[in-house]
Amino acid sequence: MRGIEDKVRKIIVCNGVYPEGGHAAPLRQFSRIACSAAALLYVDDSHGIGILGAGPPMPATPYGTGGGGLLRWLGVRSDRILLAGTLGKALGVPVAFVAGSKRVIDRVRSASKAFVHSSPPSIPNVAAALEALRLQELEGDQRRSRLAGLVRRFQYALRSRGVGATSRGLFPIQTVSYWSVREAQQAARFLQQRGIWPVVQLETLIRPDSGVLRFVITALHTLSEIDRTVDVLAVFNRRNGRGALKDI
Ligand SMILES: Cc1ncc(COP(=O)(O)O)c(C=O)c1O
């Protein structure tokens, strides 16, 4: 930011929680930089909303409480922040929002091309979003506690079956990495034929020649679904000989 002329409008853009690995952006530091540089900090917290909430994490609420996202988790507030996100991840409804100071939101309403030139979300989607928010307020912490238990079970099952858990934290997108793109594709096909649909990501930044399977765990999954997924992965790895990578 230093060295950029004061007359230029400055903006820092980041994800809140990065789905590859579930790492959180250092928003306290970014917010301090935005203040000292008179910049706007634009955070897309689509992956934090509905998962992370006000800390500190406790055994019964390991993601914090309230599901308000990374800003709540870190306790960061600033009228230099423009927060955007979709409810399409944790809350399952394809409706997005932007939140920020009145001045910035007024400007978004009148100048954002996405806002001015797009149709509004459909009434059923808005109704579903309101219902999702109502449920999240009523029983979100309970569901998140259950979700954390399922994520732990997935990691434990992977380790105990020798599959190799790539993800360490409790972020509900869990990753299993393969030595090659071909092996990841074969593993995905093997799972799909048995009714399990991971997201396949090829050529990751960390190892360009490796392939990654992402498992999106929700509070509605059951323990037996989690265990079965790991069983199927273990069978694939046994048949395949080499198995998943263990050390990314
Ligand atoms: C950070 C981030 N923002 C926005 C989106 C878009 O979400 P939606 O498909 O609900 O519009 C995604 C989708 O993966 C995302 O990862």
Image (spheres, rainbow, N blue to C red):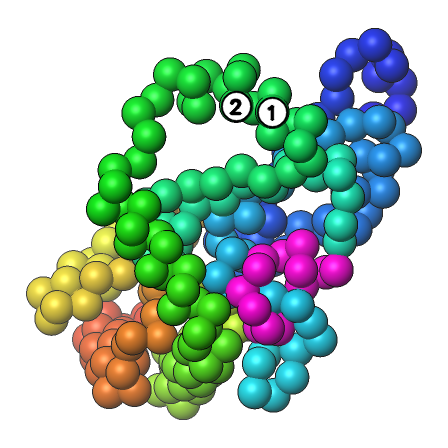
Q: Which residue is mark 1?
A: 106
Residue 7: quadrant of the picture: top right
Total of numbered circles in the picture? 2
The image shows residue 43 at horizontal and vertical percentages of 62, 41
Check residue 109 in the rendering and tell me which mark sits there, or answer none. 2
The N terminus lies in which quarter of the figure?
top right
| Lateral position of residue 171 relative to residue 229, left or right | right
Question: Identity of the amino acid at label 1?
Answer: Asp
Q: Residue placed farthest to the left in the image? A: 193
Question: Identity of the amino acid at label 2?
Answer: Arg
Question: Which secondary structure type mostly characterizes the magenta part of the structure?
Answer: loop
> Is 62 included in the stretch rendered in magenta?
no
Q: Residues within 10 Å of mark 1 (few under 14, many from 20)?
A: few
Q: Residues within 10 Å of mark 2 (few under 14, many from 20)?
A: few
The image shows residue 62 at horizontal and vertical percentages of 59, 79
- State the extent of the magenta-drawn residues as a range: 63-75
Identify the residue at horizontal 65%, vertical 38% (top origin): 100
The image shows residue 126 at horizontal and vertical percentages of 32, 46
Identify the residue at horizontal 27%, vertical 83% (top origin): 222
Visible in this render: residue 108? yes
Residue in the foreground of this view, choosing between 146 and 235: 146
Depicted 185 relative to depicted 95: above or below: below
Mark 1 → mark 2, Cα distance in angstroms = 5 Å
Residue 157: quadrant of the picture: bottom left
Mark 2: secondary structure: helix
